[in-house]
Amino acid sequence: MATTPLSDLFSHHGEQLRQVLAPLADRLRPRTLDDFQGQEEILGPGRLLRRAIAADRVGNLILHGPPGVGKTTLARIIAATTRAHFSSLNAVLAGVKDLRAEVEAAQSRLERHGLRSLLFIDEVHRFNSAQQDALLPWVENGTVTLIGATTENPYFEVNKALVSRARLFRLQPLQPKHLRELLLRALRDPERGYGNRPITISEEAIAHLVDVAGGDARSLLNALELAVETTDPNGDGVIAIDLAIAEESIQQRAVLYDKQGDAHFDTISAFIKSLRGSDADAALFWLARMLEAGESPRFILRRMLISAGEDIGLADPQAIVVVEACAAAFDRIGLPEGLYPLAQAAVYLAGTEKSNSLLGVFDALKQVRESNRQQVPSHLRDANRDGQAFGDGVGYRYPHAYAEHWVAQQYLPSALQGQLFWQPGNLGWEGERRALLQQRRAAQLAAAAEHAAEQGEVLSSAPDDPALERWLQRQLGSEGQRLDRLRERLWDGARWQRHDRVLILEARSLLWALDPLQHTPEGGVVLQAASAADRRRLEAQLQVLDQLQRPRLVGCADDDLSAALEPAERFEWIAGRHPWRGLQAPELEQRLALLSTIASPNAELRLLFSTPLLGPAGALLALGTQGDGPLADVLNTVAAAEGAWLAAPPEPSHLAPLLDEQGWRWSCQSWQEDLELSLSAELLNRWLEPQSGYRRQLQHLLRPDQEQRLLDTLRQRQGQRLPQRLGHHLLLASRAKAPA
């Protein structure tokens, strides 16, 4: 008869007891992505991380964000959905020995069963450098896939090598609507919450709990649990939670602040930017937040001294004096009365005139590091040492000997004369002196010109300085440069968000997706291939990218786009280069209607249309080819017809009324681009072979002898360059209203 080991019985009983006694926040953790509240920017339909979890293609991840936003919960959801082996460690308790044990077990599973291993490390920033280094080789060779969770900024607290091998996702504090839904779910759930107990809670109590929780789900559920478990039922046996009970259960909002973490740097950044932006109210708020969290007042005063120089400077030279006096007063007074000089310094800096003209010192430093001609002008040199032999100090004009104690003369090295490092602002002290300073600068330049005309330095024996060697930068090919300029024009002014989703219509290359791939790492880029051949080419190009970095390829231009997308997938950006080529009004209306259904409420549409304005005959005329009378007639006849032949619908004018009907606001930018085409044998064959479209048009337009005359003229030009002109139209549109 088989027996169950006694240790297993105790373990099972202990796990059951732990689940019963676990805090409400732990019992109520979501078990699926559909139950997960918040973080739509990274887990919404079609988002990169959601797709990776659903496809069981989760790579190395680092989840960072404040407490109670779902980092550990998300890791447990991944554990429940993956086919890989999942194990976890807490960096507070684990060491290198535990890491080695997990790695050895992962190696064994991979070698014996071909099973991948996911290792979740909570509070990964608590590992020291040696512990993180011990993990690096196994992450790099794929023995384990790392999922790290941290409340700190991973760029500062996690090994750079680990960060470079992982994709970072930042989880934000939960919004009030998400917290409210969690609270109500806890009251409804009979298995893990309080659904089997008679509980009522007032709207005021709910609002207070949600507000004071400050985006922290754990804090909210802990407060609810405390309220329920410490409140006696009334005469009807109902636990009634009102505002007074809610206030007792969560009395003070937690100030998230770590003197070495993100909150420290983010808050001091907000404080300094409020001073710079002349918002005294915001400055006092951020000052109070830092003091309440225990920040050192001396650190705050040091930062205000820096701000007095960087952001106020010579617009108010007294600013640094005021802050220094407030710092001295604080040292003599201390807290709590020291709040007065702290507040006085902050409000003074926020309220006074601003200037950053002192940043010119960094331009001067840059010039010092880059320039190799920094000799002190001879008239400024010390005349007490060898001055008579070398002419040092000769020609110096003593300013106090002149009216207004100033005289025009050269002070910068000759090679830098005319260089401006300090640009005085229009406000305050320096603004009052701006006109005078400009006049004196003009005089300085005149003095330099005069000095340059005089005899140069007296040198005994020294060769001239060798000329500086100039490096020649390799230029991109003209076509690559031209297309890159068009790419920049297409995305010019785009205000990206990291979690935006982008759809590229009828893509023939990756060119138009380069900007979205760089700027939307947490959203995603979807490419609709222009044709089956383009799709195969794009698939081959995408193999060089990491699985989670690749844009997603869907269908072709002739396929049903909506069927290829995920349900409820919406895009903030839709763009393309000449999509829907050759389509007429009915089909265009259908395509735009589809775009309206997959566009987010704030979507932007960017479509670039390019059309040749000169055909071969028009190019010959532009080149000045006239020839005899019959040739001129042929060229003029064909050139007049080429405009219609080259037109490639749709044009923006065709789309404009359809966009109006679909509720888009639109504008159009138009410009021309002059190019040159090399008339190669391949290009001539493409134009002139008997079955080409251009040749068929010529046959309908010209007599055989006229056609032959034109063909002979073009062949005689082989190897030459023909002018070409392109007309570009950039159609920009944004949603005027959300789709019904």
Image: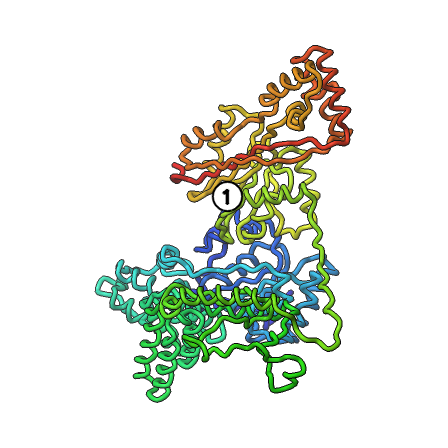
Task: Give the camera-side residue of 357 and 392.
Answer: 392
Percent of width and height locating residue 468: 71, 64
Q: Quadrant of the C terminus?
A: top left
| Residue under the point 67% across and 26% down | 624
Question: Compared to 558, does 329 lie above or below?
Answer: below
Q: Is residue 345 left or right of residue 398?
A: left
Depth order, front residue of 210/405: 405
Q: Quadrant of the N terminus?
A: bottom right
Above or below, 648 relative to 261: above
Q: Position of residue 163 (x, y in %)?
A: 61, 64
Q: Kindly indicate the quadrant of the structure image that contains residue 332.
A: bottom left
Q: Is residue 639 visible?
A: yes
Q: Is residue 334 left or right of residue 508?
A: left
Amino acid, disc 1: Trp
Q: Is residue 357 left or right of residue 429?
A: right
- Of residues 46 and 696, the one nearer the viewer is 696
Give the residue at mark 1.
Answer: 573
Query: From where the camera sits, is residue 109 visible?
Result: no
Q: Residue furthest bottom?
A: 332
Q: Position of residue 527 (x, y in %)?
A: 59, 41
In this rendering, position of residue 611 left or right of residue 703: left
Furthest toward the front, the residue is: 454
